[in-house]
Amino acid sequence: MLQLLKQYFPIRNIIFYMLEGLVIFGSFLLATLILTEFDSFIFDWFLCLRIFLVVCICQICLYYNDLYDFKVASTIVEVSIRLLQSLGITSIVLALIYWAFPEVIINQLIFMLSIGFLLIFIIGWRLLYIFIVKKGIFNRNIILLGSSPLAFDILNEIEMEPDCGYSVSVIIPDSEDEILDKDILEKICVRKEKKDLCSVAKETGINKVVVALKEQRGRFPTQELIRCRTAGIEVIEGSSFYEMLTGKVLVTQIKPSWLIFSEGFRKSKLMTMVKRLEDIFISIIMLILMSPVLVIVSMLIKLESRGRIFFYQNRVGQKKKEFRMHKFRSMVEDAEKKTGPVWAQTDDARITKVGRIIRRFRIDELPQLWDVLTGKMSMVGPRPERKHFTDDLEKKIPFYSERFIVKPGITGWAQISYSYGSNMDDAIEKLNYDLFYIKNLSIIMDMVILLRTAKTVLLGRGAR
């Protein structure tokens, strides 16, 4: 497994991205070999750089079209449609680049033949990979020790994410008398006794044990786990494994002791200063670039309905201090006059026609760039909520107050990882992601979140 941004990704996935890049690169080299008599083209570094530019743009387009999400692109029809869309966008982007920089142009015939090769090779390559994923080939087998709710959450996540790189080979329930679900018994080998744990691992060739027991006092198999550890078998606590598997912290399952002793929550003056400089720089650039959009949207809001252009609302920020947050008004004036504070719902009748468009593409959030510039918010962080909601959520959700450690953000790990939340269950799930972000906060992670936010905005996902 490869650790990246505090998450672990199967080496198989990393190899897949690299090999697909080589497939794209090789398609252009093959087309060049067929259509030219230039025998030494492989040693033409300028040609290689031009092809490398195509590879980068093509793979970015594949990513933005969800072709690296195998829950979405899992059939030949879906892969083919999305691949054609991606190659079309790649061609448009390259046409603009070639217009601006003619020296990087690739011969038109070579380009067309390369596209033909790409359709054949990438579809074939992806079908092979999907087969490997579905069959669990090269998956890392683990022993799941315990039958707690956390253990079943881990099991469900592995089953729902076929590309996670793990398979549960053996499960050992907390009690020998416990009867597990029939579906589990059909798929996974169940062992009742913990005393043979190390032997079971060696017999099955497993080198990772995930501990997710219900009650550890009195029944914790200390000696068996020590034998596993000293025999070179990795032993990992269930909450830590769930965190690295999913990119979130399961707040309803973790124990305070795990939160105290786990790695993370590191903050330094240097990182705080760099993050603030990042906020100032990005907010100024975006305010300048988006100024025409700000003016047009302001005019459309004013023309469509009576009321103010901007919507002001008190939100809870860092250290639970309230601040005034700015947004474009996307609802009718005084939308909560009769109902009081409520979460927005799907197809909310209070949303105006202009409001529906600007909410879909997150344009209503642009005025918050001013809040970032003035230091009340950050570009990346947990979304700020109203005190009416946070007071209630703090009483009902464990560790909810920890989200006030950092500044709230325009976007965040929860926003790109989970859809819009409008109830208690959604608030818990959002906190799972927010706590992961706070625990593993870094400037690089902020950059990844901003890039993924751009994808979410461009595709108009998750808004209400």
Image (cartoon, rainbow, N blue to C red):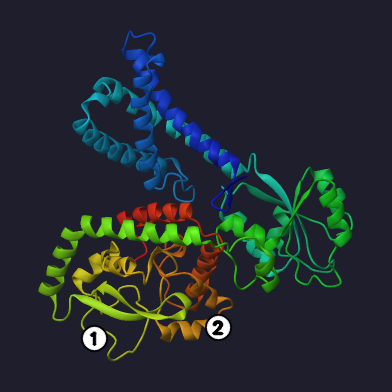
- Quadrant of the rendered image containing residue 412: bottom left
Q: How many marks?
A: 2
Is 414 above or below relative to 108? below
Q: Is residue 301 visible?
A: yes
Amino acid type of disc 1?
Answer: Asp
Compare residues 84 and 238 and report the one nearer the observer. Answer: 238
Determine the residue located farthest toward the bottom in the rendered image. Answer: 338
Residue 273: x and y in percent read 44, 60
Q: Residue at x 34, y 17 (%)?
A: 32
Q: Is residue 111 left or right of residue 5?
A: left
Q: Amino acid at mark 2?
A: Lys
N-terminal-most mark, 2 or 1: 1
Residue that appears at 37% across and 69% down: 377
**Could you tell me residue 88's position as x and y percent?**
28, 38
Q: Secondary structure at mark 1?
A: loop
Q: Measuring 37% from the left and 39% from the top, which residue is drawn there?
A: 83
The residue beneath circle 2 is: 396
Q: Which residue is mark 1?
A: 334
Kind of element beneath mark 2: helix
Query: Residue 464 in the image: x percent, y percent?
Result: 33, 70
Give the quadrant of the N terminus: top right
